[in-house]
Amino acid sequence: MKKSERIKKIPPYLFAEIDRKKGEAKAKGIDIIDLGIGDPDLPTPDYILDAMTEAIKDPSTHDYPSYNGSPEFRQAVSDWYQDRFNVSLDPNNEVLSLIGSKEGIAHAFMTFLDPGDIALLPNPGYPVYEVATLFAGGEPYFLPVTESNGYQPDLSNIDPAVLSKSNMLFLNYPNNPTGAIATDDFLQQAIEFGLKHDILICMDAAYTEVYYDGYKPRSILEFNRAKEIAIEFHSLSKTFNMTGWRIGMAVGHSEAVQALGKIKTNIDSGIFKAVQRAGIAALKNYKPFVKSQNQLYQKRRDIVVNGLNQLGWNLEAPKATFYIWAKVPGNKTSEQFSMDLLENTGVLVVPGSGYGSAGEGYFRISITTPEEKLVEAISRLKKHHVQFDMTPSPQ
């Protein structure tokens, strides 16, 4: 059997590889505390389940759904954006339903790249950005997103020869894996950059509803002239503990949204109508649930940040997402540290190198785990003398 050249270029998906290594550790009898994948451990709230229960019993939800999303779901998205971000969206032309934002993000590269076109991508970044670029026949060009530049890529020093072939800039704020947030100045700069060079700005906004300490993330569509050049990908997964439900949305630049819809109509058949009705309920009643859940996540965040700081790290608590991004102690690589930690303590974290070369030297912790497990994880690190030594290594 001959495999396509594109499939040969694709490395194993990071989280599939983590699942494999987790399985190996379990087979050895290791008691694992999984701080790896960002999959909320909390249940989908009852008010959403109630809407789903009612909808699934309605036979009118059992046939093929609309490719672009039901008018009612698209209107609910439009209403939510108006209430949450003060952004006005035309539900007919500027809103598209997605089978989870990952699907929409992957198809975006197929929509906007021809072979040889360049996609400007954050490094470190969500692995799907690079893989989808390669699937589309495009060329990834990585922009460092690191502590040294405040986790915001420098858009002013990109080679003009690269810019001339670039068709997309992907951003992700609040950021996975680093937990970083973007300044208003940077987001406006990104819009102006896109307009100047005719480069579509794609914002992965999956984590805007996980935030702390009085900070409230903004949509890129809030900024001046954004809808002329930007499309935003959002999801109900992280906000409402609906990762398995597969429902999200792409919004913004009407031509871009409709072009993405054209790809999708030829590939998928839309979201189950009952799930869309549950999504409508979620969006209409989001404020109390988001507030209470973020209070819970903030407690978890503080357990991990304070615990690591007691062990020698000097972390600032992230203002958004449910991730902690920390430097690897000693001289180990990210993967060596993560595998040794799993073997020695049973605590599973994600090596930063899995998100790109600029992630080397870091690891990511997800706080989608009960408080008692997080306390136990820190206790195991203390027991096994895992700490961050600030003393420089001898030359």
Image (cartoon, rainbow, N blue to C red):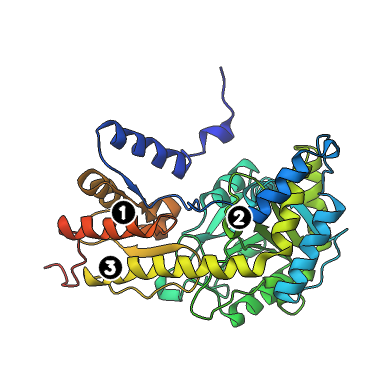
- Rendered image quadrant of residue 384: bottom left
The disc at residue 45 is 2
Marks 1 and 2 close (CB-CB < 8 Å): no
From the top left corner, tell me how far across and down residue 42 is, in percent.
Answer: 50, 53
**Residue at the image point whose x is 31% and y is 54% from the top:** 334
In the image: residue 87, left or right of residue 48: right
Residue wearing tag 1: 334
**Residue at the image point whose x is 57% and y is 52% from the top:** 129
Q: Type of residue at label 1?
A: Ser
Residue 279 in sight: yes
The disc at residue 307 is 3
Say what secondary structure mark 1 lies in: helix
In the image: residue 2, left or right of residue 258: left
**Dot 1 or dot 2, earlier in sequence:** 2
Front residue of 316/165: it is 316
Q: Residues within 10 Å of mark 3 (few under 14, many from 20)?
A: some
- Rendered image quadrant of residue 182: bottom right
Say what secondary structure mark 3 lies in: helix
Say what secondary structure mark 2 lies in: loop
Depicted 299 relative to depicted 121: above or below: below
Q: Number of numbered discs present?
A: 3
Q: CA distance from mark 1 to mark 2?
A: 36 Å
Depicted 376 relative to depicted 222: above or below: above
From the top left corner, tell me how far across and down residue 128 is, in percent.
Answer: 56, 48
Q: Viewer-nearest of labels 1 and 2? A: 2
From the top left corner, tell me how far across and down residue 379 is, in percent.
Answer: 22, 59
